[in-house]
Image (spheres, rainbow, N blue to C red):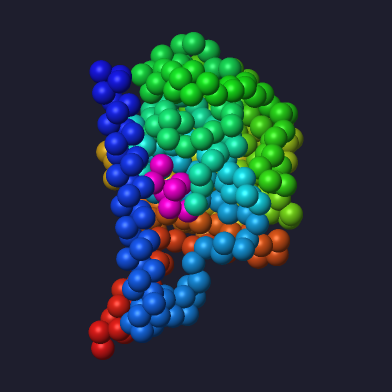
Amino acid sequence: MEKRERELREKRKKLREAALLALIAIVLAFSATPNGRELWTWLFAISEFSGPSQQSPLRVHVIDVGKADAILLECQGEAVLLDAGTYPRGDTVVDYLLRVGVTELKYVIPSHPDSDHIGGMAQVLQEIPTQEVLTYPWPASLCQSTEYQNLLQATREESLSCRQVLPGDVFSVGEARLQILGPLKAHEDSNNSSLVIRLDFQGFSALFCGDIAYEAEKDLVKSGVDLDVDLLKVPHHGSASSCSSRFLEAVSPAYAAVSAGPDNSHLPREETLRRLEETGAQVCRTDVEGDLVFSWDGETLSLWTERQYNRALEYALEKLVQ
């Protein structure tokens, strides 16, 4: 069974590579035509749209994987993946990485063992070369899920280095500094046991919180650690039990990114969105905007969304047929 699954994954990988090469050839051929040149001119010249800057040394991608998390950090040629969505979204994450040119990951980091954060991680490890997996020493009681066992098995099969991290540990992606801030104490539930990671790079900062709720938020605020950042990846998909007023006052983000999708939980909750807006944050949602890409060039933080691209494409096509 396992051999059959690996053969199918390898076959899918080869098919994706062939399809990507064919698509690139078609796009290049079309781009050489007068209509093709006009299309690209309209796409990248329309008002308020330029796409994610490839020249920016730092990019934070919040990948649209529904009510789940998958975050790609790119800095100066190195890449880190925080979470990888659900098991069915493994293909989505792998395809996205390849589409933006990521062929190797320095670190893969699960925020906590829940299936909507690590479900697609085994597939990522099997298909994208990875240098090291960073995990927190969660108690065995939180690590019994099939998805977490698949992650451990993929780590062994790919002979990957696996390192445990604790609050205070610091590591890097390019020149960006990543510091583990939490969890600061043991919790019985997996959500409050999420890794909390702060990113700093040339005057820009971001905070990634997994699925922490009020209790873990309170731990962070009481610790006195610096939580003030430009970008907050909103905890727990914007649930009512996250983003307490005290926590948001300490974080004071300019942008708040919510990863959400159709779900019976009806996330993000209105009261959470209201608290975010009251802090002055610009709220960005994958269930509304699609993929989100934040680019920092050392002076300016720019936001590109999948919906912007779709609108630009529609506008350009309309102009071409007029």
Q: Quadrant of the C terminus?
A: bottom left
Q: Nearer the viewer, residue 264 or 27?
A: 27
Across and down, in percent, residue 153 comes to 44, 18
Q: Is residue 26 visible?
A: yes
Q: Residue furthest bottom?
A: 322
Q: Is residue 99 left or right of residue 229?
A: left
Query: What secondary structure is the magenta-colored segment mainly?
Result: helix
State the count of labels: 0
Q: Is residue 249 left or right of residue 159?
A: right
Q: In this rendering, is residue 214 above or below 234?
A: above
Q: In this rendering, is residue 40 above or below 222?
A: below
Q: Quadrant of the N terminus?
A: top left
Q: Residue at x 59, y 32 (%)?
A: 131
Across and down, in percent, residue 26 comes to 32, 66
Q: Nearer the viewer, residue 253 or 218?
A: 253
Q: Which residues are magenta?
A: 94-100
Q: Is residue 209 visible?
A: no
Q: Residue at x 46, y 46 (%)?
A: 97
Q: Is residue 305 left or right of residue 26?
A: right
Across and down, in percent, residue 10 comes to 33, 34
* Magenta highlight on residue 96: yes
* Magenta highlight on residue 70: no
Q: Residue at x 51, y 35 (%)?
A: 129
Q: Residue at x 37, y 61 (%)?
A: 24
Across and down, in percent, residue 20 comes to 35, 53
